[in-house]
Amino acid sequence: MGRFAQAACLNNQGVTALLEGNDKAAVAALTQSINIMKQELSNVPENNDIKRSAPFSSNDYENRSTTGKLPGFHGAQDSYIFAEAINIPEHGDQTVVDIQIYSAAVIFNLALAVHREGNTTGSASSMAKAQKLYLMVLEVLNNQYMNSRVAVIVKVAAINNLSQIRFDCGEYELVREGLAHLSTFLRASGNTSDAMLEEPKIQGLLMNVLLLKEPVIAPAA
C-alpha cells in the first residue's frame, strides 16, 4: 500500500469512527493521516512548480469522494454547522494538487471531531482548537484549487463553521473576518464553474455565512 493510500485509509477509518461516535479513535486515525500527507508533500522538490500547479488528476477520480453526516451537533435555532465528514478514494493516481486538497479534507474532518466534542461538552478549549483547525484548512486551500468540487466544499464549509462558532460566541468582529475570507474566495472563483457554485449544498453554505449578522440591540428606554 502506497503512502497516499495509507493516509486515505486512515482518514476513512476516522470518518467511520466519527459516524459511530468513537471520537477518540477518530482523532487518532485522522491525526496519523494528516502526518502522512504532510510527509508526502514535504518530499516534493521545491522547484517542482509544474507538478505543484498540475490540474486535478481526473473528475472521475474526484467524484469517488463521499460524505457522511455526523450526529451530535446541537446549536442555537439559527445555527447551521456543515457536519458532513469526507471520505476520500484510496486508489488512483495522485498529483501534488490532489494530496494538497485531500490533506485539507482530512484536517476538516479532524476539525469536525474537535468541534463536536466542544459542542457536546461545552469545552472552550475544544472550540478554540476547532477554530485553529478550520483556519488551517483555509491556509492549505488557496484559490488555485477552486476548480475542484471537493476543495470548494471543504473551503466554504470551513468558512461557515468557523464563522458560526464565532457568531455563537458573540465574536462579531471575527465573524466579519469570515466574510472577508468568503469575499476573497468569490472574487477569485474564476476557476470555479457556475454549476458548482449553484449546487444547493454550496449555495446554502454561502447564504448562511452572508446572513450571519451582529444582532441589533434596541437602546434602553
Image (cartoon, helix red, strand yellow):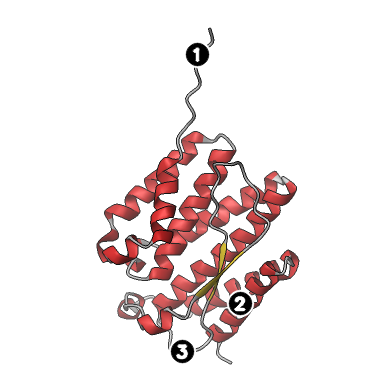
Q: Which residue is mark 3?
A: 92
Report the side of 83 relative to 203 (left or right): right
Task: Give SS at disc 3.
Answer: loop
Q: Residue furthest left?
A: 190
Q: Give residue 44's quadrant in the image.
A: bottom left
Q: Which amino acid type is marked by label 2?
A: Asn
Mark 2 and 3 residues: CB-CB less than 8 Å, in contact?
A: no
Mark 1 and 2 residues: CB-CB less than 8 Å, in contact?
A: no
Q: Nearer the viewer, mark 3 or mark 1?
A: 1
Mark linked to residue 219 = 1
Quote the CA–CA distance across marks 3 and 1: 61 Å
Task: Give SS at disc 2.
Answer: helix
Q: Which amino acid type is marked by label 3?
A: Gly
Quote the CA–CA distance across marks 2 and 3: 16 Å
Q: Is residue 156 above or below residue 49?
A: above
Quote the CA–CA distance across marks 1 and 2: 51 Å
Q: Which residue is mark 2?
A: 12
Give me the residue at 47% from left, 32% from top: 214
Could you say where residue 182 lies in the image, as x and y percent from the top left?
A: 38, 50
Mark 3 and 1 residues: CB-CB less than 8 Å, in contact?
A: no
Report the side of 54 relative to 171 (left or right): left
Mark 2 closeness class: few <14, some 14–19, many ≥20 residues within 10 Å: many
Q: Is residue 1 above or below residue 59?
A: below
Task: Give SS at disc 1.
Answer: loop
Could you say where residue 109 lies in the image, as x and y percent from the top left?
A: 58, 65
Mark 1 closeness class: few <14, some 14–19, many ≥20 residues within 10 Å: few
**Which of the marked residues, 3 or 1, is nearer the chain's N terminus?**
3
Give me the residue at 31% from left, 53% from top: 186
Report the side of 109 relative to 22 (left or right): left
Mark 3 closeness class: few <14, some 14–19, many ≥20 residues within 10 Å: few
